Image (spheres, rainbow, N blue to C red):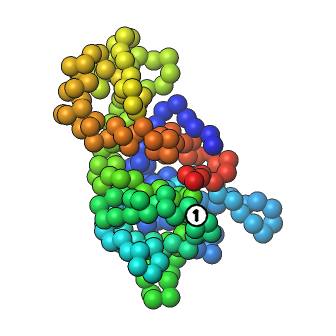
Amino acid sequence: MATQAEPQSFQDRAFFPSFRDCPLEHAWDDRYLVEYGETAGVNRKHWCLLGDIIQADTMIRPRIVAKDHKGDRFVVAFYPDDPDDMPRLLKDFKVGNTIAIFYPLVHRFLDGSVGVRIEDSDEVLIIPLGFKDVIKMNEQVLKYTVAEGTQRKCHGCDDVKVNVNACARCTLFYYCNRDCQAKAWSEKEHKKFCKTLSRKDIKLMHFLKYETYDGSISFK
């Protein structure tokens, strides 16, 4: 999976569309698909739908109701090809977390509701943070993570320096000293984000080369 040196903004609508702007199931959309042969198509890029989970049910079939960045609601129903992958998602399957769905297609269910039917569960991630916090976390990564070979910006005081030390856990943010680290831990809420940012799947979401499709993402 191709990655890039600089992080990707989760508010770039070319790669993080609203629910209504996702491609329709069984319909051609040049924004998301490219022709491959005479009758088939493949993904043109990576794209991801983020949603704030407002309802989560597991009684009969795992089902979520979420809201996108515009406030539009959509259903997410799981029909996984690999049931063994579901425990990975179910541990964070609750209201207040954020669902990330890669390559979502708008589906109309038999009950008349509209949403996304999930068969490839490995293309789904549930982030144990609220939607607004996910955006805030991403904004901080965008601001403080720079390409290799360039000077680092201290996450605590914002000074640009050569001699700074990386956070031992997430390795994304840098600090002049312990005082700056303590300041960022509390005032910039790194205490809330550090554990999540230390995960490989969350880092992949940030640094995936979205415009270059070289195979579907898998979080399994």
23 left or right of 162 in image: right
What percent of the width, then of the height, locates residue 117? 53, 73
Taking depth in this image into account, of 64 and 69 the one nearest to the observer is 64
Residue occupying image coordinates x 29% and y 16%: 176
Where residue 76 sits, quadrant-wise, is bottom left
What percent of the width, then of the height, locates residue 110? 50, 88
Residue occupying image coordinates x 40% and y 71%: 64
40 left or right of 59 in image: right
Q: Residue placed farthest to the right in the image?
A: 38
Q: Quadrant of the N terminus?
A: top right
150 left or right of 184 in image: right
Above or below 43: residue 208 = above
Above or below 82: residue 140 = above
For label 1, count other residues whose C-alpha is less than 10 Å away and answer few (under 14), some (14-19) or many (20+): few
145 left or right of 78 in image: left
Residue occupying image coordinates x 36% and y 26%: 167
Question: Is residue 62 in sight in this rendering?
Answer: yes
Q: Which residue is mark 1?
A: 84
Q: Amino acid at mark 1?
A: Asp
What percent of the width, then of the height, locates residue 216? 63, 54
